[in-house]
Image (tube, grey):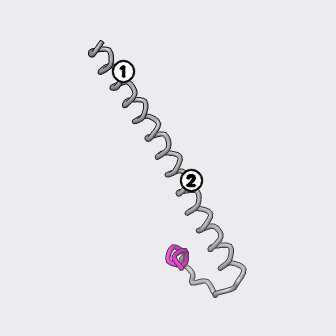
Amino acid sequence: FMETQHHPKILKPNSKEYFKARNDYYRKELLNKETIKQRNQEEIEKLLKELKNERFKKEDRTQ
């Protein structure tokens, strides 16, 4: 499990410190995933807006 690599001391499996480190690690991972999801969502919305704008420009030209 990865968090032990970042820890200067090797943690005993099933010790209190081990579980705390593991939970901290998973919490960090989850936070990263949420942040990425949020960023992707914002990016998608921006691109959709640009696409709509392009379509409107094209329609204006055809009329």
Residue at 63% x, 73% y is 21
Of residue 35 and residue 16, the one placed in the foreground of this image is 35
Give the prevailing secondary structure in the magenta stretch: helix
Q: Residue 41's spot in the image, x, y percent?
A: 50, 44
Distance from label 2 to label 1 (Cα)?
A: 33 Å
Q: Is residue 23 above or below residue 50?
A: below
Pick whichever of labels 2 and 1 is earlier in the sequence. 2
The quadrant where residue 20 appears: bottom right
Q: Amino acid at mark 2?
A: Glu
**Quarter in which the N terminus is drawn:** bottom right
The stretch in magenta equals: 1-6
The quadrant where residue 62 appears: top left
Question: Of discs 2 and 1, which sits in the foreground?
Answer: 1
Q: Residue 18's spot in the image, x, y percent?
A: 65, 79
Answer few, some or many: residues within 10 Å of disc 2's Cα (few below 14, many 20 plus, some between 14 and 19): few
Please give left or right for residue 48 compared with residue 22 in the image: left
Numbered circle sitting on residue 34: 2
Answer few, some or many: residues within 10 Å of disc 1's Cα (few below 14, many 20 plus, some between 14 and 19): few
Is residue 4 in the magenta section? yes
Q: Amino acid at mark 1?
A: Phe
User: Which residue is identified by label 1?
Assistant: 56
Q: Is residue 7 above or below residue 54?
A: below
Q: Residue 40's spot in the image, x, y percent?
A: 46, 46
